[in-house]
Image (tube, rainbow, N blue to C red):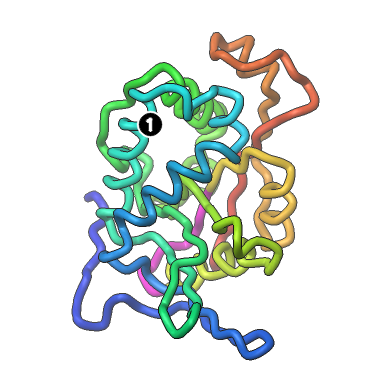
Amino acid sequence: MPFERIWDASCPRVWSKWETNGQEWVVQDLEVGDFENAVNILLEEMCCDEVLCSVSNLQEDAESMAEMKKFWAACLAQRMSLGLYTWVNGVKTLAALNVCVASTGDDTVPETEIEGAAWKNVYMALDYIEKKKDPHEHTGLETMLHAFGLLVKRQFRGSKLGEKLLSAREPLCRFHGIKGTTTVFTGPASQKLATLAGFQEICEVTLKELAQSGLNYPSDENRSIKLMIKLYE
């Protein structure tokens, strides 16, 4: 059975909160009213900064940008994504987010068509590494929390907010009875961050291997993507 989030009066739930130098921060369920804003932030910043999107020149492909917008909107609709908020001049402000979906090995979430040459190039790289080492088969878990984008807005970078989002997956998963999370980390900084947060690498693929598989990537042995997992016993 596909996973379905029960969204009731207790939502959005808070998963973590702290204060630094008088600044209050909170990680919670991404507020429904912020879905459109979140997608726009991802399109503006992640499509430019993330390795696979950048190498694929995704922002120059209008069709791919439109299709990624649909994809992220479909992900957020499951209501399992995380939002990290702070207060700026008394206004609650989205500072960072992690697009998360719970899915089983048999279900594809979200069920959207992958269109646009650049977006297909990005998505097929993720698909390639997960077919090479299926995280569900590796862990024996039917349901896992997958993620399709972690972004800290540029003006809030440097405060280790990415690590806070990764750590917040644990209470989110435990509350829903999910015993593990998996993500393809595509750049050195995110891979290092994931390791610090307790993730373990189960598969690594170089851009050269992606190119040899028929995808449009440079034949670069020095850059790689890593499929990583973290289990919650």
Q: Which residue is the site of mark 1?
A: 65
Q: Quadrant of residue 106?
A: top left
Q: Quadrant of residue 43?
A: top left
- Binning the other alpha carbons within 10 Å of mark 1 as few (below 14), some (14 to 19) or many (20 upward) gives many
Residue that sits furthest to the right in the current view: 222
183 sits left or right of 208 in the view: left
Q: Residue at x 66, y 27 (%)?
A: 205
Q: Secondary structure at mark 1?
A: helix
- Name the residue located 41 percent from the left edge and 78 percent from the top edge: 92
Residue 43 covered by magenta stretch: no
Residue lying farthest to the bottom in this orientation: 22
Residue type at mark 1? Met
Depth check, front residue: 228 or 161 = 161
**Percent x, y for residue 142?**
39, 50
Left or right of 162? Residue 99 is left
The relative height of residue 117 versus residue 25 in the rendered view (above or below) is: above
Question: Where is residue 54 drawn, in percent x and y?
Answer: 58, 30
Q: Position of residue 114 (x, y in %)?
A: 33, 26
Residue 146: x, y in percent?
45, 49
Relative vertical location of residue 201 with respect to residue 5 in this rendering, above or below: above
Q: Which residues are magenta?
A: 175-182
